[in-house]
């Protein structure tokens, strides 16, 4: 995947907002990796802020919808992992400021 496409994908993922925190999943540091195969299937490897997140299904649906308009992408798989575990240090400076975390 070229850099422009990856940037486009990450930009689309910034539109997916964690409903509980009100910050997008990219700035929260929830997206660990994005890969695309030759057939145009994108795999988004990500985590959630907690294992028992009741909105996991909603977030996965939003990820898939956010990438649906990118012509190069034919299919999306969201791989939820909990290793490494998410922590506040994974957040961008923007997310930390928005949430009042130092």
Image (tube, rainbow, N blue to C red):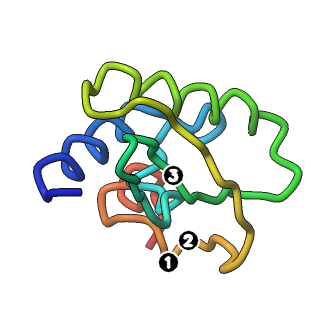
Residue at the left extreme of this rendering? 4
What x and y, as percent, mark residue 50?
78, 58
Give the residue at x 66% y 80%: 84
What x and y, as percent, mark residue 68?
40, 22
Query: In the figure, is residue 46 to the left or right of 75?
Result: right
**C-alpha separation, residue under disc 3 versus residue under disc 1:** 20 Å
Name the image quarter holding the C terminus: bottom left
State yes or no: discs 3 and 2 in contact (Cβ < 8 Å): no
Q: Nearer the viewer, mark 3 or mark 1?
A: 3
Give the residue at x 69% y 27%: 58
Is 35 located above or below residue 38 in the figure? Answer: below
> Counting other residues with Cα less than 10 Å from the Cα at mark 1, is it few (<14), some (14-19), or many (20 or more)?
few
Name the image quarter holding the N terminus: bottom left
Q: Nearer the viewer, residue 55 or 83?
A: 83
Query: In the figure, is residue 76 to the left or right of 73?
Result: right
Numbered disc 2: secondary structure: helix
> Disc 2 designates what residue?
88
**C-alpha separation, residue under disc 3 versus residue under disc 2:** 20 Å
> Counting other residues with Cα less than 10 Å from the Cα at mark 2, is it few (<14), some (14-19), or many (20 or more)?
few
Numbered disc 3: secondary structure: strand
Give the residue at x 64% y 35%: 60
Count of marks placed on residues: 3
> Disc 3 designates what residue?
44
- Displayed quadrant of residue 9: top left
Query: In the figure, is residue 50 to the left or right of 61?
Result: right
**C-alpha separation, residue under disc 2 versus residue under disc 1:** 4 Å
Numbered disc 1: secondary structure: helix
State yes or no: discs 2 and 1 in contact (Cβ < 8 Å): yes
Query: In the figure, is residue 70 to the left or right of 34?
Result: left
> Disc 1 designates what residue?
89
Q: Nearer the viewer, residue 2 or 18?
A: 2
**Tag shown at residue 41:** none
């Amino acid at each position: 995947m070229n850099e422009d496409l990856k940037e486009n994908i990450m930009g689309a993922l910034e539109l997916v907002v964690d409903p509980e925190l009100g910050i997008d999943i990219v700035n929260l540091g929830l997206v660990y990796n994005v890969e695309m195969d030759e057939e145009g299937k994108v795999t988004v490897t990500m985590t959630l802020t907690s294992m028992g997140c009741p909105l996991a299904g909603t977030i996965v649906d939003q990820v898939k919808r956010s990438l649906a308009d990118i012509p190069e992408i034919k299919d999306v798989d969201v791989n939820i992992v909990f290793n490494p575990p998410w922590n506040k240090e994974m957040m961008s400076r923007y997310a930390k400021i928005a949430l009042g975390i130092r």
